Image (cartoon, coloured by chain):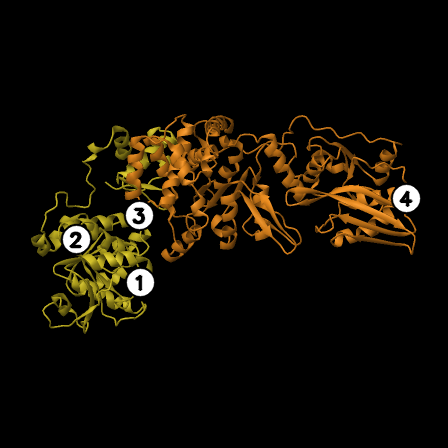
Amino acid sequence: MNERPRRMRPGSGEWPEGLGHLSSPPRGLWVLGSVEPRSPAVAIVGSRRATFGGIEIARSIARDLGAAGIQVISGMALGIDAEAHAGALDAGGSTVAVLGCGIDVCYPSRHADLRDRIIACGSVISEEEAGTPPFKSNFPKRNRIIAALAEAVIVVEATERSGALSTARWAADLGREVLAVPGSIRSRQSSGTNLLIRDGARPFLGLEDLFEAAPALRAVVSRPAAGLGTAPARGGLERFSPALREILARMGTQPVHPDQVGVALGLSPSAVAARLGALELAGAVMSLPGGLVARTV
Amino acid sequence: MIACAISGATWGLAGVPVSVEADVANGLPGFTIVGLTDRAIQEARERVKPAIRNAGFKFPQRRVTVNLAPAEMPKEGTGFDLAIAVSVLRAEDPSLRLDGFAFIGELALDASVRPVTGVLPMARCLAASGIRRLFVPAENAEEAALAEGLQIFGVGSLGACVQHLRGDRLTTAASRTASPPLGEPEPDLGAVRGQGQAKRALEIAAAGGHNLLLTGPPGSGKTMLARALPSLLPDLSSEAALDVAAIYSLRGTLRERPPMTLRPPFRAPHHSISRAGLVGGGSGVARPGEISLAHRGVLFLDELCEFSRQHLEALRQPLEEHAVTVVRARAAVSYPADFMLIGAANPCPCGHLGDTRGCSCEPRQLSAYQGRLSGPIKDRIDLVVSVPRQEYRDIFDGADEERSAVVRGRVEAARERQTARPGGNGVLTGRETLAVARSTAGARRLLAMSGERLNLSARAFFRVLRVARTIADLAGEDRVGEDAVAEALHYRIEVTA
């Protein structure tokens, strides 16, 4: 990207209105990208060290929002944040990454490709001066901007000490809607979100919850996608052969080991491997690090 | 008087005949050995003298000069002792007939003959150079007898050797052991419960000679599965077995492996091994390392990610060329190293990624750990499969597991199909792979789709196709079909990164 970042100042026409709600708004923002932050938008945040399930949920919510024309805001961190951006981009939507470092710094560095995609279909913004390294102290400040830009904040997965909870607190203070994806009480990665729910955040079970909490969003839905909702659409399996459908029908989005599939269906390991290979190629199944597979449709 | 006895040295895996010339002349009594010798050969003077005396002969009280020819080749070790002693005796006693004989062995002060390393490769080369009868230490007689066209006499002492030469008392020639001895039974695949995917991957790897990576949490049975791999491999040809025995002879480790066995070797070096120990090296002329000991067999690297980058980097050349060249100050030698690599690794530093226990690694740790696998080694691994932790109930109940012998039958049939084609499937180049795959239209469509959707690099693409070729061979099919490609895609290594 050879585009130069430009400066956005309070009071100018493009200055996001939401930032005015902050008691200490940024004195200006560096912006790099083609689509500015616009209202209403939804922030999707969560743990860097997310579970496979969390990653899948973050991506699918973002995909639905992107398809509906709602901008997705996040922090470009590893884990949930990255999936939120990627999901929105996959659906052809726009997304804004609020950085905790200088606008010209790519942190984490492995998100260089993602950053380019975001700049092409959305923008990265930062309050920090160019060249600022990702100091730890920058991130809470960054979180307040994410909260202020969004109409609602969805926390997908977070531990009790996750930075995502700080974003949620900022959002609550600013009067934004806070939604949390509930998880098992045994799951460490859901301990923070469950805590949020106990403290009054709205449980997020599907997009309907989001629209109920923030009706302004429903009004801007440009393309009411057919299957809005995060529950995976169960239909549409007709395109697969009966042998492949048999496997899909027995798989949930919960990751399983191929051997479990084989035992459950009484299939030989080679048959399981061949079918999973075909399903993965069709995009219906995802191979996860550690050798597990999960259904994605 | 001048005399000459033939002995042997090793140069890499090849033997070299060495003429041991002795000259006994008038002058001040003395004993000199020349011919690019090392310390051990210089010390032979102090062994040979008392040995000759203690065997009941007389060491000449004159000026003795011994030359080891070819003089420009560096020589080392204690195997020349016997030849030196015999040539000195012959210089004083013309009735000793040395024609057609060769001598290998270290002498003790009491004139007994001690075993040395590298007897088998030396015996093979001496046989080729026209020697018909070879004296070796009694302990080395069995391995030496593997060389064709030689009469082997295993002797326990210098005295016995001289008595034979004089015709006083003949030593009986060692006979070739007829049948390969049964070594330790190999671990059987049937002893592993469940693990269907991993067993299938082992079968494919064995059938095509593919390198394989097992990932899984600690205690899931990766090591047990890896150790069962040799039991799936067919017997070695007797020629290949002889090559393997020669390498073990060089290292002096034939006690670990019966020289006559036809079973492929299995080596499992620990990750703390030195680089020289792994690929070969050491001072003087380099000795073969673990990768050469695994020649024609299996090299198992447990905790693959714990091996240093330099170690893994050093495996690159042997994995591509099936041989390793080790350069040392005195010489550069080549050893064969045509092995199947099987690696085992935890999926992440804590070992529980994808496990019910949950992973507690930082993302940064995780990528650093997986980064170690990339590069030199990853390009050479065709299959990867995860080995999950077994549930307790699976350990106790469970169907009868397939025995190794059954799987080996299928592997042998699949290998039979490959013999008509160049190389084993695991070593095919991209062009060869395309030529032998004979993929169906459906398979080609899947492959084209996979390149696009799964982001396969060209290298990864050929890995998938090679594995698919083996899967088709196992199924007895001439052409690579859709199922074979789909299954091969499932085992691709790109998933781990």
User: Which label sits in the foreground, 3 or 2?
Assistant: 2
Residue that label 1 marks: A107
Circle 2 SS class: loop
Dot 2 crowding, Cα within 10 Å, few <14, some 14–19, many 20+:
many
Circle 3 SS class: helix
Q: CA distance from mark 1 to mark 3?
A: 22 Å
Which chain is depicted yellow? A
Are the residues under badges 1 and 3 in a single subunit?
A: yes
Q: Measured from the top left, where is residue A223 in percent x and y?
A: 10, 48
Q: CA distance from mark 4 to mark 3?
A: 85 Å
Q: Measured from the top left, where is residue B206 in percent x and y?
A: 48, 34
Name which residue lies at 69% across and 31% down. Answer: B148
Are the residues under badges 2 and 4 in a single subunit?
A: no
| Residue type, label 3 | Phe
Please state which of residues B342 and B473 is positioned toward the viewer in this rendering.
B473
Residue that label 3 marks: A52
Circle 4 SS class: helix
Q: Quadrant of residue B158?
A: top right
Q: Measured from the top left, where is residue B258 in percent x and y?
A: 65, 34
Q: Measured from the top left, where is residue B98 in percent x and y?
A: 83, 37
Residue that label 4 marks: B92
